[in-house]
Every structure is written in C-alpha cells, then in structure tokens.
Image: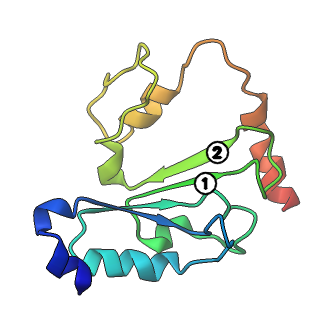
Amino acid sequence: SEVQGRYPPACRRLACLDHISSLPALLLPAAALTQACRAAGFRRVFVDGAHAPGQVPGLDVPAIGADMYAGNLHKWLFAPTAVAMVYATEEMRCELHHPIISHNYASTPNTESLLDEAVMLGTRDYAPLMAVPAAVRFW
C-alpha cells in the first residue's frame, strides 16, 4: 500500500480516524478503516466519534476494533453539555492516564487504573453524567 511504501514501520504508531467527518458530514466505515490501518502496520488506532453517538444507529464501539474511541454524548444523543465518553481496550487502559493528576494517579497497576484515576476530580457537578442513561433511553 502507499502508506507502507512511504512510511517505515517505526513511523506507524498511531492512526487517527473520524467516524463522521465534520465537513461534509460523511459517515465513514470506521471498522473497515481500522482493519486497513492494522493491515498497513499501525500499532494503535484511535477513532474520533464526536458526532457518532446519537447519529449512528446501533453504535457498537468494541466491534469497530479500534484501540481507543471517543464520542460526545451532548451533541446528538441529547445528554447535558460537556458529557462525553472514552472507550479503550483493556490493554490500552493500562497505558492511559487521566490528564488531571489527583490522589489516585497510577495508584493501582491494573486494567482499571484510568477509571481509578478519574473517580475523584475534586469539586465537580456530576448531574450531567447521571443524566446519560435517560438520554440513551430517550434516543
């Protein structure tokens, strides 16, 4: 492929894909593109699914096969402002850290360390997060 010829394997660390492009708002075949990236030798695949939750019926994030997937729930799923989701494979959860360092930073060397680090971020309004199940049921 063109990617394999142009870039040596050491340069193929992370592929970043859109699930739905911003302009001209095209639904892209995320699973097929993820497979193509794997075939081209990319070590990791991240899918930006900012517009997908609420737009893609039956969205099955793990079935896409990407290592990481992020989506906004406040855009088309009608959840409160600033509610989003991040999916990471079990292997990736060990490598990711929360951007806000708090008392649980790398406290447990297990597959849930990212979740552990995100539990307590200090003073925060958790009401938007609690509204997500209602938004999913509404959609």
Name the quarter where the N terminus is drawn. Answer: bottom left
87 in relation to 34, above or below:
above
126 in relation to 24, above or below:
above
Model colouring: rainbow
Q: What is the x, y in percent for residue 86? A: 53, 48
Q: What is the x, y in percent for residue 9? A: 12, 68
Taking the view exactly as shown, the residue that stands out farthest to the right is: 138
Taking the view exactly as shown, the residue that stands out farthest to the bottom is: 1
Q: Is residue 128 left or right of residue 120?
A: right
> As shown in the figure, which amino acid type bears the numbered disc 1?
Gly
> As shown in the figure, which amino acid type bears the numbered disc 2?
Ala
What crowding class fits label 1: few (fewer than 14 Cα within 10 Å), some (14-19), or many (20 or more)? many
Q: Nearer the viewer, residue 103 or 108?
A: 103
Q: Which residue is mark 1?
A: 71
Disc 1/disc 2 C-alpha distance (Å): 6 Å
Whichever of labels 1 and 2 marks the residue nearer the N terminus, that label is: 1
Q: Which residue is mark 2?
A: 84
Mark 1 touching mark 2, by CB under 8 A? yes
Q: What is the x, y in percent for residue 38? A: 28, 75
Write the residue at 43% across / 30% down. Answer: 98
Write the residue at 84% across / 49% down. Answer: 134
Badge 2 element: strand
Give the quarter of the image for residue 103.
Answer: top left
Badge 1 element: strand
The image's mark for residue 126 is none
Write the residue at 58% across / 70% down. Answer: 60
What crowding class fits label 2: few (fewer than 14 Cα within 10 Å), some (14-19), or many (20 or more)? some
